[in-house]
Image (cartoon, coloured by chain):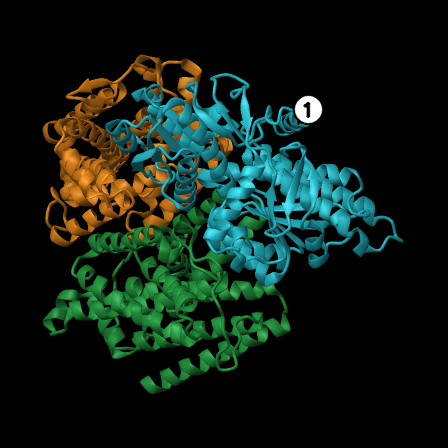
């Protein structure tokens, strides 16, 4: 524990700027993954434990396409779409078969898929960890704001993800598609009786979740190492976020992710050896005080 | 199509083993027992984030074993390597080691697991009495602590204490020369990371007392995001930084630090950069990073070393790395021990290996020794230098004086009541 | 009626133990002995989890908390306190009961998925503690140096056959005890709470208290599984408290079945055998095991033991036999749980 260091930091503008930026980054990438988890749970009442594998696929796809085309933009779009398609296949072929079953059976199915995917990427891309490297457009020195450090790529990530969060929020609250999704989430039986094809909606939500996770993996690739099993850490954190923010709430996922990001970034200063423990503690506190999460609906 | 390298190789192994067995077994007057293959069990990590451990460990051993078999084996008995995936779980490592010995007829164990797995396998060796060669564990306590010592366990890997003394001695000189007073550490938060960092800082102060540790960052092992650590480092603004991050973590760290232009702002000392996994994976390797060698085909700058690296590359289509040479070394000690003892019996083999000196391209002076009193490897080539972004990646390496290492190591053992 | 079924269970337990004891003599294979010891550890652990999942309807993600706690407290007691093995075992169970009491009191208030995640959070907190408290636990290296095994009551666990008998004995004893608990009025009340909590409350049953009791019992037995594992590897590793160990237990009860009492043990046999065989035959463990798991989960969609039991049920129903519910509170969907 290093409380003096923490106190020092929160009283220094440059430290606040730097740590908050870093918290924002962690949070925004986490949000892309957690939003998908939250949506899928909200609409299908399924906890998609395999979501980390979507993320991993996105990273590997961007690696390959960037290597072939030298265009980061093309690579990111391809990766996101690719994982969206995978999400669709996963939903139709695998997870839809266990819709009625216990949560634990769904967990078992996801575990099978995780095992397979982790091995497949090892077979196809090799066991060594890979590195994408920073795309040329972002290879610039960082900005200095109030004495704090803000890297160019990270600024791009934050802005882009905020736009996506906005778009997602609008899509769900303002568009017809959003209305249908919400209707199915609240009462699938009624929605179906009203003529909505719930099967399409389920598939669509999984595709969207896949798209977001694949995008997260692709965008994270320049600043992560890519290796089999990389989805593990992401999926555990995204569950913490979903619990804190509230299952089924995109706004909750955003707030939860930012909270976790900030806890991590300021936590490493004050509690360098117990940062993971802090996150679980936070999760426990939220569950005890308000189980449905900050933005979740009761019951 | 897909990279089925490993599959092809294991099928080849089985095939060549079968052919050899058939050929040998076809002589009616040769008793079966005499030409039964000598099976060596290798629990190792073949999946997940550390899958590189498994492939490089096995490759290192195979190179030695093939030479041994080609020269006739042990009186006609060929060595057969049986590698299994522990998936990085110590309880699997324990179970597999037992299975390899109890059910699969393995007479010797090559422990190519990581440090936690090594302790589990060590207990199995204690229980079953077979010879075990620890190939990858760098935790000094494994051999230094007399409470853990058993006559049939040996270590062929480099050790944390040796590396820290070497690092401290080099860094101390540079600190003195360049006036580097404010230091910060950024190492993975687990036993290896913490022990290595603590020892390094101790020895840095020993060689250059005028240094101050102004901060510490402890990212989690396999943590993909270093933003919080990096921003902390940039806040504190040290003059020099030490890190024992390794593998994918180090690659990610270097890539991420480049965004912040970290390497221009401080001198960086890292134990693990000079290893081809990093050197070839990092897209824009900054120049001027101080690093100790993990494995370099140009250090020692001998024909033997270059030849070994070329053979390895030709056969396996990848660069040899730290685990490759450590496993090759461990395998060689066992194989030479088999020749010397003339038998696979555990006590005879252990007695043969203990104290043995072999010729090796990885030795500081062309030889390597398995020190008798604590059954661990000494006199391996270790040195420090600075990186450049292209091959040979580290053109000048200053070798470390082993006399200095021995002296300080003895003091450290006394301090910890190991002797 | 109850006494006769208890007697029957005891006899079955004795027979099983006798068979297990004879096995290494008839088939001297250390590999097989190792398998049974591991089966003991996981069989006890998985069955204890099923007390929560199958019988109490509490789906816990964090049961590994007790497995890890059991392994570490036993290992530490033997290494640091130098106690005898029975004393260390008793201490471990006592500690687990206390921890389960505290954790359970907080968790069982919540329902379903929130309960699951909170148990997970507590487990990971223990894991973080184990990793951080290096001087006590050895950190990520685990407890090194081996777990001492001083002889007690003429049993010396240093000898392989003794360790085998001890593990098999613990397995049979724990299963028998847990069986007795689920067949008791407590067990039936638990099932009522699982199926219809509102009705239970209206009957004046303290739902929270019963659930807490189930949690504590499950925790106590779960820790015994950890003890056996720590004896097997002669140590304890942070792995034992990581969420993956909870996952393994969950997979075992899913593969084996949650309705039959011995379902989890069957699942443990299945998962261990699959693990061992696949590891032996191929380097592509993930691919093969994953495909097999998918086949099971998507094909059967329930545990193997449950599936077979239902098949048998359908056959005997087809033969026109009358089925009387054998126990009070048995709901139609759980015909088998009374047996």
Chain name for mark 1? B
Is residue A193 at all visible to an observer of this figure? no
Label 1 Cα crowd, 10 Å radius (few <14 / some 14-19 / many 20+): few
Q: Residue at x 38, y 62 (%)?
A: C72
Q: In this view of the protein, which residue sits in the foreground, B134 or B195?
A: B195
What residue would you read off at disc 1?
B303
Q: In this view of the protein, which residue sits in the foreground, C273 or B314?
A: B314
Q: Position of residue A37 (x, y in %)?
A: 25, 39
Is residue B284 at all visible to an observer of this figure? yes
Q: In this view of the protein, which residue sits in the foreground, A258 or A60?
A: A258
Answer left or right for B62 relative to B254: right
Q: Which chain is cyan?
A: B
Rendered position, B289 above or below A249 = above
Rendered position, A67 above or below B320 = above
Answer left or right for B328 relative to B241: right
Rendered position, B32 above or below A28 = below
Tally of marks: 1
Q: Residue at x 39, y 64 (%)?
A: C76
Q: In this view of the protein, which residue sits in the foreground, A168 or B121?
A: B121
Q: Residue at x 39, y 85 (%)?
A: C7
Q: Colour of chain C?
A: green
Q: Position of residue A196 (x, y in %)?
A: 18, 36
Point out the image quarter for the N terminus of chain C. bottom left
Q: Which chain is orange?
A: A
Q: Quadrant of residue C259?
A: bottom left
Point out the image quarter for the C terminus of chain C. bottom left
Q: Secondary structure at mark 1?
A: helix
Answer left or right for B16 relative to B121: right
Q: Position of residue C149 (x, y in %)?
A: 49, 70
Q: Position of residue A246 (x, y in %)?
A: 16, 43
């Amino acid at each position: 524990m290093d409380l003096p260091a923490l106190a020092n930091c929160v009283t220094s503008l440059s430290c606040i700027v730097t740590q908050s930026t870093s918290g924002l980054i962690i949070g925004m990438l986490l949000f892309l993954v957690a939003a998908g988890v939250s949506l899928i749970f909200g609409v299908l009442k399924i906890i998609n434990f395999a979501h980390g594998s979507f993320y991993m696929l996105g990273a590997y796809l961007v690696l390959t396409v960037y290597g072939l085309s030298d265009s980061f933009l093309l690579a990111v779009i391809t990766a996101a779409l690719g994982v969206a398609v995978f999400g669709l296949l996963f939903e139709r072929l695998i997870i839809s078969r266990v819709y009625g079953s216990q949560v634990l059976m769904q967990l078992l199915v996801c575990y099978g898929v995780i095992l397979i995917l982790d091995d497949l990427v090892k077979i196809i891309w090799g066991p060594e960890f890979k590195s994408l490297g920073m795309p040329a457009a972002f290879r610039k020195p960082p900005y200095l704001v109030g004495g704090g450090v803000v890297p160019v790529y990270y600024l791009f990530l934050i802005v882009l993800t905020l736009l996506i969060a906005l778009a997602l929020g609008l899509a769900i609250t303002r568009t017809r598609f959003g209305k249908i999704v919400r209707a199915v989430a609240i009462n699938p039986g009624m929605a179906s009786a009203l003529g909505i094809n719930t099967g399409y909606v389920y598939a669509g939500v999984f595709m969207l979740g896949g798209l977001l996770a694949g995008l997260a993996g692709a965008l994270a690739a320049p600043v992560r190492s890519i290796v089999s099993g990389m989805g593990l850490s992401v999926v555990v954190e995204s569950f913490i976020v979903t619990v804190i923010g509230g299952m089924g709430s995109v706004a909750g996922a955003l707030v939860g992710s930012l909270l976790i990001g900030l806890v991590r970034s300021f936590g490493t200063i004050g509690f360098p050896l117990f940062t993971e423990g802090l996150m679980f503690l936070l999760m426990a506190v939220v569950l005890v005080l308000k189980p449905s999460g900050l933005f979740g609906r009761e019951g | 199509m897909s990279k089925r390298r490993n599959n092809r190789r294991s099928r080849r192994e089985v095939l060549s083993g079968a052919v050899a067995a058939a050929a040998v077994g076809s002589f009616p007057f040769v008793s079966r027992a005499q030409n039964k293959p000598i099976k060596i069990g290798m629990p190792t990590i073949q999946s997940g984030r550390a899958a590189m451990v498994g492939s490089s460990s096995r490759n290192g051993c195979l190179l030695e074993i093939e030479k041994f078999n080609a020269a006739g084996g042990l009186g006609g008995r060929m060595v057969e390597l049986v590698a299994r995936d522990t998936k990085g779980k110590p309880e699997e490592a324990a179970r597999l080691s037992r299975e390899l010995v109890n059910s699969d007829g393995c007479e010797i164990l090559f422990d190519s697991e990581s440090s936690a797995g090594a302790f589990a396998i060590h207990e199995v060796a204690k229980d079953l009495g077979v010879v075990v060669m620890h190939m990858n564990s760098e935790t000094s306590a494994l051999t230094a602590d007399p409470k853990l010592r058993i006559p049939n366990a040996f270590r062929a890997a480099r050790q944390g204490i040796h590396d820290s003394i070497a690092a401290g001695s080099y860094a101390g000189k540079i600190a003195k020369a360049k006036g580097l007073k404010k230091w910060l550490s950024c190492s993975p938060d687990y036993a290896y990371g913490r022990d290595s960092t603590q020892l390094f800082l101790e020895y840095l102060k020993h060689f250059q007392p005028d240094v101050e540790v102004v901060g510490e960052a402890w990212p989690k092992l396999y943590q993909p995001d270093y933003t919080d650590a990096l921003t902390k480092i940039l806040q504190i603004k040290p003059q020099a930084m030490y890190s024992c991050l390794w593998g994918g973590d180090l690659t990610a760290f270097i890539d991420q630090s480049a965004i912040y232009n970290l390497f221009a702002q401080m001198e960086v000392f890292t134990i693990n950069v000079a290893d081809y996994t990093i050197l070839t994976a990092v897209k824009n390797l900054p120049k001027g990073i101080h690093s100790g060698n993990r494995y370099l085909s140009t250090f020692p700058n001998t024909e033997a070393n270059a030849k070994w690296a070329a053979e390895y590359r030709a056969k396996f289509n990848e660069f040899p790395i730290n685990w490759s040479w450590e496993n090759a070394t461990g395998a060689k000690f066992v194989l030479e021990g088999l020749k010397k003892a003339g038998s696979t019996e555990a006590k005879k083999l252990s007695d043969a290996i203990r104290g043995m000196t072999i010729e090796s391209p990885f030795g500081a002076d062309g030889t390597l020794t398995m020190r008798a009193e604590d059954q661990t490897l000494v006199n391996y080539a270790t040195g420090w230098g600075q990186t450049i972004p292209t091959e040979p990646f580290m053109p000048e390496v200053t070798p470390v004086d082993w006399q200095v290492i021995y002296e300080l190591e003895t003091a450290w053992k006394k301090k910890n009541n190991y002797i | 009626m109850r006494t006769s079924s208890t007697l029957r269970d005891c006899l079955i337990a004795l027979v099983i133990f006798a068979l297990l004891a004879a096995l290494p003599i008839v088939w001297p294979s250390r590999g097989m002995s190792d398998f049974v010891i591991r089966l003991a550890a996981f069989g006890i652990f998985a069955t204890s989890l099923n007390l929560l999942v199958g019988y109490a309807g509490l789906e816990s993600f964090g049961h590994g908390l007790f497995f890890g706690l059991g392994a570490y407290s036993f290992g530490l007691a033997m290494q640091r306190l130098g106690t005898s093995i029975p004393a260390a075992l008793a201490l471990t169970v006592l500690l687990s009961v206390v921890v389960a009491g505290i954790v359970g009191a907080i968790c069982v208030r919540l329902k379903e998925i929130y309960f699951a995640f909170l148990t997970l959070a507590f487990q990971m907190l223990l894991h973080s503690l184990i990793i951080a408290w290096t001087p006590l636990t050895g950190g990520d290296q685990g407890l090194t140096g081996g777990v001492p095994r001083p002889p007690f009551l003429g049993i010396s666990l240093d000898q392989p056959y003794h360790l085998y008998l001890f593990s098999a004995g613990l397995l049979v004893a724990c299963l028998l005890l847990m069986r007795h608990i689920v067949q008791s009025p407590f067990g039936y009340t638990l099932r009522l709470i699982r199926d219809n909590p509102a009705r239970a409350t209206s009957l004046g049953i303290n739902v929270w208290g019963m659930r807490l009791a189930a949690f504590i019992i499950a925790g106590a037995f779960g820790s015994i599984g950890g003890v056996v594992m720590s004896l097997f590897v002669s140590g304890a590793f942070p792995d034992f408290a990581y969420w993956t160990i909870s996952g393994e237990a969950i997979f075992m009860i899913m593969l084996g079945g949650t309705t039959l009492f011995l379902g989890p043990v069957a699942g443990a046999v299945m998962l261990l055998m699959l693990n061992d065989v696949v590891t032996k035959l191929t380097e592509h463990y993930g691919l093969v095991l994953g495909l097999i798991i998918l086949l099971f989960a998507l094909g059967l969609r329930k545990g193997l033991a449950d599936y077979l039991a239902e098949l048998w049920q359908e056959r005997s129903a087809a033969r026109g036999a009358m089925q009387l519910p054998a126990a009070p509170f048995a709901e139609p969907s759980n015909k088998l749980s009374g047996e």
